Image (cartoon, helix red, strand yellow):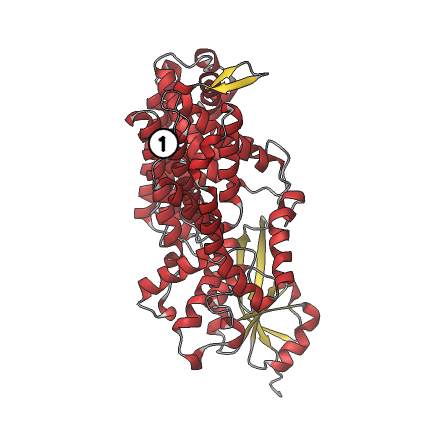
Amino acid sequence: MYLPGFFTIPPVDRDESRFAQASRQMFESVALPAGERDAGLHSGGLVVPMVASKPRLNKPPLIYWLQAASAAAFTGGDPLRDAIWMYRVPSLLAGIVTVLATWRMGLAMFDPRAGWLGAALLAVAPVFVWEAHQARADMVMVAFTTLAVWQLRRIWRGGVVSERAGALRAPRAAAPLLWLFTALGILTKGPITPMVIVLTALSLSVLAREFRWLRATRPLLGALVVLGGVAPWVYLVAERVGFAEYWGIVYGEVLGRAGSAREGHWGPPGYHLVLLVVLFWPGSLLTALAVGRAFRRGLRGSWRRIRAVRSTRRPEAFLLAWLVPSWIVFELSFTKLPHYTMPLYPAVAMLTARGVFAAMSSALPGVAKAVHRLGFALWCVPGLLITFGLGAAAYSSLGGHWNERPSALLLWSLQIVSLGAVIVAIGALRRGAWLGVHLCGGLIMVCLSVGLLGGYLSRVERVWFTTELVEKARSAGGGPIASSGFQEDSLVYLTRGRIEFVRPEAEVAWWAANLEGVMIMPREQVGRVHTVVGEVEGLRYTKGRVEQLAVVKRWEPTGD
């Protein structure tokens, strides 16, 4: 699922290009000879991530260290030989770790079938497939969060006060590992990991009306481990930029995103719940019924008054404590992006897998009636969209953006397989063969990964037009490169941070200082003082519009 397109998809705007460029500059700051380093690009060293000449302190440093280490390993220490896929390797490994950890937890909580299916549904979920292809912090943070919750589960299972022995019994290594993974999660993406851990533990304690088990987590040790991991970097950054400025950045990222919509990323409550249908496809078919079943079996009492956790149903109770409180926090937060709830998807996957096998044994109430509901019919829509999307890609490959008949044949073949899987899935859905339905959905997702990510997306120049822009700018001369009226982070990555973004009113001053320079600008911005040396048209997917851009040099009279 994760390798198709991993090596061939160009740098993606905007976050991936920012992360990769910051990691590259960190790598260069220690790997380049002193005489080749740029004071503006490499002044941050291994402490302060930099994108071009600006610090990037809104994210902690671990993801940059991991990506820089990956690039160093694959290039033999030569930054000039790097490629975007090298910065994606931590996300790829984190995706695999998350899937395997989910499998092991499902195995321990339920049985081998549920553990395998839960991990498989998580592995093929669209949001996980895409994030495993991205050089960003999210997939790594999800891996550390999942590993930390796994250790909390071990403590909860062995550390709850036994009714017979009256003593705490928790694995010795569980607490140190819990806090180690929590500290690594904080160093990757701030407060998300500790928030999930704390809310899960408190929810279990409130439901069980039992708090003594929390002593088995060894909170004092946890505070020391977290402070020991985080405090040294915070001190070094504060020493560089000032504690007040850094605290302002942290405050804005944590409380600012929760209290107001940042960068236009707003959504109403229920945003993540609606997107779950697509982002967790094909597993989303029975998720709602499976979660309802978990409430009935994992909690004692009515919906109005939940009194205690059933001792024989702790797996469901634990997964609900992991899922529900943090999901509510994400829904109430003003800033929303589709991938924010990813740390909760392993719990969704395990509950769903258990629900699938309950449905197969007629132990999932409401399934027979729900087959005929609109929601179940809508589940087929993503499968059909994927199928026809593969066909559209095959048609485009023959007459559009690129012309490779073997690749088109592959896409047509995958469309036929995907369409066959949709037909079989609909038949299995009507018969109530729930495992078959989900396996067919997984096959459709494999076709999507191989066909669209591996066979088509990376070859559509119209989408990755910034690569062509930079190539035309470099071929126009060896001078500096600037951009006026058009700004994307992939330009920064593709020029290794050596591009200037100039406001239109400052163009004259830039041309005066860079006589041999080259500038990128919208076509309508080109004037008489410019000589056009290249033009590019492409789809700017971050804005959802087509851009017509020109590469220009300063016009010089010939004297004729």
* Element carrying mark 1: loop
How far across and down, in percent of the image, does residue 58 sit? 56, 56
The residue sitting at 44% across, 14% down in the picture is 367
Count the numbered circles shown. Answer: 1
**Which residue, as the protein is rendered here, is positioned at the far right?**
505
Please indicate whether residue 272 sits to the left or right of residue 115 in the image: right
Name the one closer to the observer, 226 or 73.
226
Residue plotted at (39% across, 13% down): 363
Residue 295, given in percent of the width and then of the height, sits at 49, 20
Q: Which residue is mark 1?
A: 169
Q: Is residue 388 visible?
A: no
Q: Nearer the viewer, residue 443 or 34?
A: 34
Task: Work out whether 174 lies above or below 253.
Answer: above
> Is disc 1 surrounded by few (<14), some (14 to 19) or many (20+) residues within 10 Å?
some
Using residue 56 as the reference point, say whether residue 251 is left or right of it.
Answer: right
Location of residue 208 with respect to 40 vertically, above or below: above
Q: Name which residue lies at 55% across and 53% down.
A: 540
Tell whether 504 sits left or right of 358.
right
Does 109 sit left or right of 340 as displayed?
Answer: left
Closer to the camera in the image, 45 or 542 = 45
Give the quarter of the figure containing the N terminus: top left
Picture residue at 64% right of the left edge, 52% below the top: 252
Tell me the quarter of the picture where residue 85 sits.
Answer: bottom left
Q: Quadrant of the C terminus?
A: bottom right
Residue 247 location in percent, x, y?
Answer: 62, 57
Q: Amino acid at mark 1?
A: Arg
